[in-house]
């Protein structure tokens, strides 16, 4: 893959518009790391990341005529990737109730450790804690999950999220507030179910 300085994006886009297959492959190779990073960070566990990345690129090519150059091309593709992920999250069937039994053994151990205030966290527990966070995040609405992931896990700014999603800052803040409250409620419910 060529680095950003040596890759002629404008020239490549011109050749892609002329149906140059080699240019299309070069464009995909150039954008793949960016697209797969977005897909991996916003993908439900049961969806193949490669399938979703391929869908992003298909949308990019079919909508290429819509790109006007108002924003940098990689940002335009990022927005397509984020929107595609949100669409898949919305399409995913949601379970009506989240139960202690839905957790893996490691996730249950981490939750139990949190409830008993054990301060020592080993590598296995850290991985299980990460899995638990993602399990809880999967219970959120797709848009809320996306905001929490971007703000809290990826440390993106409100402006960066607005650029990727097209949402205004107020909407992002409200979604984040509601999502965090919902996560807290889910966590408390799990703790209470485990104790009973």
Image (cartoon, grey):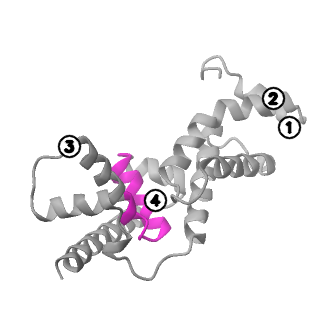
Q: Position of residue 78 (x, y in %)?
A: 59, 46
Q: Which comes before the other along the chain, label 4 or label 1?
A: 1
Mark 4 crowdedness (10 Å alpha carbons): few <14, some 14-19, many ≥20: many
Checking the image for residue 146, the label placed there is 4
Locate residue 65, reporting x and y percent: 81, 47
Residue at label 1? 17
Determine if residue 17 is in view.
yes
Pair 4/3: label in front:
3
Which region shows up in magenta? 134-155
Q: Secondary structure at mark 4?
A: helix
Label 2, on which residue?
Answer: 23
- Mark 4–mark 1 Cα distance, whole angstroms, equals 32 Å
Which residue: 64% across, 46% down?
Answer: 50
Looking at the image, which residue is at 39% across and 63% down?
135
Quadrant position of the C terminus in the picture:
bottom left
Main SS, magenta residues: helix
């Amino acid at each position: 893959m060529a680095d950003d300085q040596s890759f002629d994006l404008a020239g490549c886009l011109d050749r892609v518009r002329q149906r140059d297959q080699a240019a299309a492959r070069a464009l995909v190779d150039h954008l793949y790391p960016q697209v797969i990073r977005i897909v991996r960070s916003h993908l439900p566990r049961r969806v193949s990341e490669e399938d979703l990345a391929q869908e992003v690129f298909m949308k990019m090519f079919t909508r290429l005529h819509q790109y006007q150059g108002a924003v940098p091309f990689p940002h335009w593709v990022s927005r397509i990737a984020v929107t595609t992920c949100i669409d898949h999250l919305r399409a995913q069937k949601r379970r009506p109730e989240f139960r202690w039994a839905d957790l893996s053994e490691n996730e249950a151990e981490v939750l139990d450790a949190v409830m008993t205030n054990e301060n020592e966290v080993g590598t296995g527990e850290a991985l299980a804690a990460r899995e638990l966070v993602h399990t809880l995040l999967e219970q959120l609405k797709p848009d809320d999950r996306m905001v929490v992931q971007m703000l809290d896990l990826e440390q993106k700014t409100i402006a960066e999220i607005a650029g990727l999603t097209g949402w205004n800052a107020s909407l992002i803040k409200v979604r984040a507030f509601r999502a965090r409250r919902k996560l807290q409620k889910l966590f408390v419910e799990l703790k209470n179910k485990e104790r009973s």
